[in-house]
Amino acid sequence: MKPLFRSILALLLLASFARPATAQERGPLVLAASSLQEALGDAADRWVAKGHARPVLSFAASSALARQVEAGARADLYASADEEWMDYLQGKGLLKPGSRARLTENRLVLVAPLRSRTTLRIARGFPLARALGSGRLAMADPAVVPAGRYGREALTNLGVWPGVAGKIAAAENVRAALALVERGAAPFGVVYATDARASKGVRIVGLFPASSHRPITYPVALLKTSQHRDAEAFRRFLISREGRTILARRGFGKPQ
């Protein structure tokens, strides 16, 4: 082989390896609830280790992501922090039939800044409003965001919502609510147990009784517009025993 030909061939090979990744090579686009950040990051790492292209993960409130899908966002998978927003998309005909599955479960906790020494026992009528004083209770927007809806339901069933309803610092998602407590901008917050576990800036004051709110379940489904060849395989991986074990390491529960 002539030296000039070898040089040209080497340059062509280098160019083929250096070319920008196509949409297929980048992996499926996953729209997921904010609380799944670390867990799905771990799952994506494991998926890559198996020889697949890394999924593109986009996190926000389940409500905001559902609205994006409704507006025509091109994505492959949707993972919600409640059944209602998945029901919403299913009712609009935006899910691939038969692809919806329950991914995992979570619990709800009351958190305070790490250096706070305030103690509260979560029970019916517990003095949360008095403990807040002039401060506010950080939580995801209770009107639309799943974490906020679960929180309002729990506080209502425990008989304390009327006393704190006017003291809510409503955040766009559960991680934004967590950040308010981490910064000391709110003396208490209602977040998922997995969020508290992922944070180094808060401590758990108490766990809300499971009976005080609906089960916190996370469904996952393929979107009807998905064209990615790995999307269904990644969905199956997430709901497999291996995938759910990865989520469990971050504190998520096994779906019933």
Image (cartoon, rainbow, N blue to C red):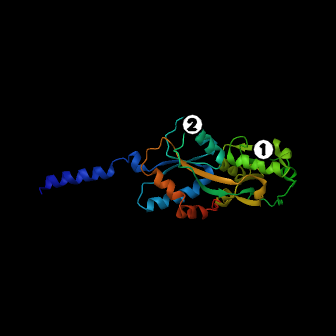
Q: Position of residue 107 (x, y in %)?
A: 70, 57
Label 2 element class: helix
Q: Residue furthest front?
A: 98
Give the labeled residue for mark 1. 168
Q: Is residue 15 visible?
A: yes
Residue that appears at 55% across and 34% down: 71
Pair 1/2: label in front? 2
Which sits in the foreground, 189 or 36? 36
Residue that appears at 44% across and 50% down: 27
Give the labeled residue for mark 2. 70
Q: Identity of the amino acid at label 1?
A: Ile
Q: Identity of the amino acid at label 2?
A: Glu
Q: Quadrant of residue 209?
A: bottom right
Q: What label sits on residue 182 in the rendered view?
A: none
Q: Is residue 115 visible?
A: no
Which sits in the foreground, 199 or 62? 62
Q: Quadrant of residue 70?
A: top right
Quadrant holding the N terminus: bottom left
Q: Position of residue 230 (x, y in %)?
A: 44, 52
Q: Position of residue 174 (x, y in %)?
A: 67, 49
Q: Earlier in the sequence, mark 1 or mark 2?
A: 2
Q: Position of residue 87 (x, y in %)?
A: 62, 43
For the residues labelled 1 and 2, the Cα–Cα distance comes to 29 Å
Residue that appears at 50% across and 58% down: 237
Which sits in the foreground, 32 or 210? 210
Label 1 element class: strand
Q: Is residue 166 left or right of residue 249?
A: right
